Image (cartoon, rainbow, N blue to C red):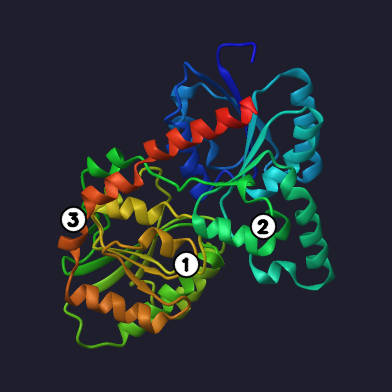
Amino acid sequence: MNHEKTKILLVIRWPVGGIRTYLRYVYGKFDPIRYSITMLVPEVFEIPFLMEDLKKQKITLISLSKIPNAKEFMLRLFSLLRKEKFDVIHSHGLTAGLYTLFPAIVFRIPHLVTIHDQFLRNQFRGLQGKAKKMFLFAAMPLFTRIHAVSNDVKENLIEFILSLKVLPSKITVINNGIETERFVNATALNLRKEFSLPNNSFLIGFLGRFMSQKGFVYLVEAMETLDKRNDLKKTPIVLAFGEGGFIREEKAAIEKKGLKDSIRFLPFTSNIAPVLKGLDLVVMPSLWEACPLMPMEALVAGVPLIGTNCLGLREVLKETPCVMVPVKNSIALAEAIYQEMKNPSKDAAEGFREKAVSRFDVKNHCLALNTLLHEIIRN
């Protein structure tokens, strides 16, 4: 390196949801005196929020179209890398990593790709799926290093991409972390007053994008089940803070089921800490995850959480007071919510906060990521 600062190029295909939060937590902690960061991203709704979160980094932003294809990504990368030298490229998500792979090789720049998702069997069905698998078999060992955000993600990569099975050192596991002080010090928002809700309401939070992966439909079914009970001392109400995905379809389905008073859709918020603390329960009915941040945030905030035992989520919830139910089982989810309403676990959640802070502090992640970045630059 022939300059004082380490120059990092971040390449992101979908700077939304968990990836956007990851960037805020992790790169928000990087020392701006030591690092110079350039970010190549599509021009989407969340970018102004992300730039505000990372304002101390004085990031150089290079915008693409709202839905850029591989050609646009690669042309912009070639143009950028011809003009400017970077010490390392950090791609977020497999698609971004694959778009960046060839330009990184041509310009001989170390390339770290962070995998924020899992492979599913139906992705590799048929001739097209087999061709995709063969391509990944050849391409993935070409990354300088692969960062898996959980052990479940690493095992998933090795299961589906056999070339990585003989190159285990190619994959480094660094579990996600969060900005714990944001949730420790937040003041709870009085959600009942804020949204004119009944005093006897039991507030259930769903915080995430409305994608099939997040299992929102099973929470809706669980609410249908609870709606039929006549022994509830409180009124369960879901507050869904999210955006994107199939939100219009979800709203229409809920109105059709007559649950619009039980499930309220609320605007996206960039600071969820006060919201979390104002909830009685957080529910994550996910079908699969990588290493989700939401349960970490809830645990540090001292809020009870019910999640599924799916890949990625189970790893975060292990040895915590959180309740796990089977994937796609709305009956079990309804029963778990009922039991939480009947016997609240708030004290157990509060008692676990100190351990949660120690376990999930993003400073641990940042230290490990810094070490990894400098290791691949040196080598």
Task: Confirm whether residue 61 shows in the render.
Answer: no
Q: Percent from the top left, x then y, of residue 348?
A: 18, 62
Badge 3 amino acid? Glu
Cα separation, mark 2 vs mark 1, equals 27 Å
Q: Position of residue 48 (x, y in %)?
A: 51, 34
The residue carrying pointer 1 sits among few (fewer than 14), some (14 to 19) or many (20 or more) residues within 10 Å by Cα, namely: many
Q: Residue at x 78, y 37 (%)?
A: 74
Q: Residue 86 location, x and y as percent?
A: 67, 23
Find numbered disc 1 in the image and state the secondary structure of the residue it sits on. Answer: loop
Q: Is residue 33 above or below residue 192?
A: above
Which residue occupies the foreground of this view, 236 or 41? 41
Tell me where residue 122 appears, x and y as whole percent: 69, 71
Residue 286 is marked as: 1
Per the rendering, the mark at residue 350 is: 3
Q: Which residue is mark 2?
A: 165
- Horizontal side, residue 206 vs residue 291: left or right: left
Direction from residue 87 to residue 59 in the image, left or right: left
Q: Earlier in the sequence, mark 1 or mark 3?
A: 1
Give the residue type that dot 2 points to. Answer: Lys
Amino acid under disc 1: Ser
Of callouts 2 and 3, the N-terminal one = 2
- Tell me if residue 64 can be seen: yes
Q: Nearer the viewer, residue 358 or 163?
A: 163
Q: Are discs 2 and 1 less than 8 Å apart at CB?
A: no
Q: Residue at x 31, y 83 (%)?
A: 227
Mark 2 vs mark 3, foreground winner is: 2
